[in-house]
Image (cartoon, rainbow, N blue to C red):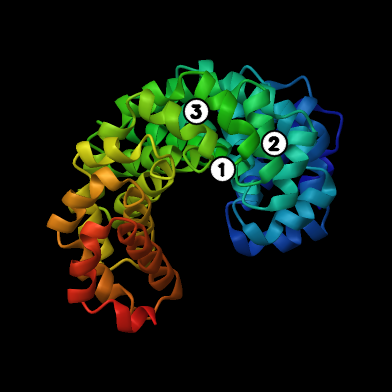
Amino acid sequence: PCLVQFARGEDTVSRRFGCLGIGNLAIVTANHQELFDSGAIASLLPLAVCDDLETRRCTAFGLNNVASNEKNHRVLERMGVLRPLVALIKDKDQDTHLQACLAVRQLSLTPKCRFQFVEMKGLQPLLALADSDSIEVQRELAAALRNLSLSEQNKISIVREGGMDVLIKFAHSLDVEIAHQSCGVLANLAEALENQGPMIETGLLQHLKYVLRSKSVDVQREAVRAIGNLSAEYSHTAAIVAAGALLPLVPTLSSPDFLCQRYAAMGIANLATNMGNQPKIMQAGALQPIISLARRDNGDLDSQRYAVFALCNVAATRANHAQLVQASLIELLAALLDDEDSQIRNAACFAIANLCANPANHEEILDAHCLGPLI
């Protein structure tokens, strides 16, 4: 109660130390409930706009500490904590806006807080932190944007409010964490159909091609996921290949990271829905790694599904048939007709149907004993 009285008092020094005391107590999670019950946390909220810099720093520090506990998020949202945090993010003092950014990052794990932050016009001041010289601020900004981008409407808002420039800049960062988080945001944004056209128009594909050369598997994974998501819309598939994104995508099919393999297979499967891309996918050397994933050599079911979808699609072009047959695809498809997974069985069946369109394949299809499972 004494600290609350100090924080609510008129004396600047007393208020400052009251605020600092509350912030220090909030470091310990076990104190949080009592800090809420005593009104200590509520007493911090008006101090976000006080004239004293040290008090504003302590306020941001205290709010970040309670935001670190996800159990507090609902209460903080109801208290209206996002509005003072937006004010603290606008603060020119680095320590202050860093702590506020940390708090927003943590609160954005909760859907209502993500929504409310954008409603409070928090995106513009948050994006403005990209100009900071502090690596730590940039890391927290990228991480906050990643959490904010988990909500569908926020994905659109981030693009509309100029987030692409920041994210593209950060994707090239020499700091692996900044590049990783930023590519993760780009991949999230690419899930929204409304964003895909504008994202491609910004020249994003050229940047993703460069980022795919990163030595960090974490960065590669998110860049591949971004391309995979952009390719989900048929109308963009030709532009993605024309931009040269196919060639750097193919090596990630053989990445040591199974998620990289999964997202690459997803991207190839999506790109292969375009007949014009199908011969190019074969020419790029995607066949052998795709067949490996279709056998589930990496142990990942989703990778296998996408790989079989990809094979089904490239089999729609008759000019690819000789190469597919030579790679023993018919024997693999015959085995997949009995797979436990219905999606794999269906895709294998469609692939055989595509190969059956060419009479030259009929004998091999019968020799592989495909007819019985098909019947």
Dot 3: element: helix
Which residue is found at the position 64% from the left and 40% from the top? 104
Question: Circle 2 sits on which residue?
Answer: 59
Which residue is found at the position 57% from the left and 36% from the top? 145
Residue 100, how many percent across, how many down?
63, 34
Tag 3–tag 2 contact (CB < 8 Å): no
Question: Circle 1 sits on which residue?
Answer: 191
Q: Is residue 251 left or right of residue 28?
A: left
Numbered label attached to residue 137: 3
Indicate whether 189 appears above or below 364: above
Is there any visible trace of residue 94 in the rendered image? no
Q: Is residue 133 left or right of residue 101?
A: left
Snapshot quadrant of residue 95: top right
CA distance separating discs 3 and 2: 18 Å
Residue sticking out furthest to the left: 326
Amino acid type at mark 1? Glu
Residue 149, how many percent across, how many down?
60, 41
Amino acid type at mark 2? Thr
Give the foreground label among 3 and 1. Answer: 1
Dot 2: element: helix
Indicate whether 244 appears above or below 225: above
Residue 163, how many percent across, how many down?
59, 24
Amino acid type at mark 3? Val
Label 1: few (<14), some or many (≥20) within 10 Å? many
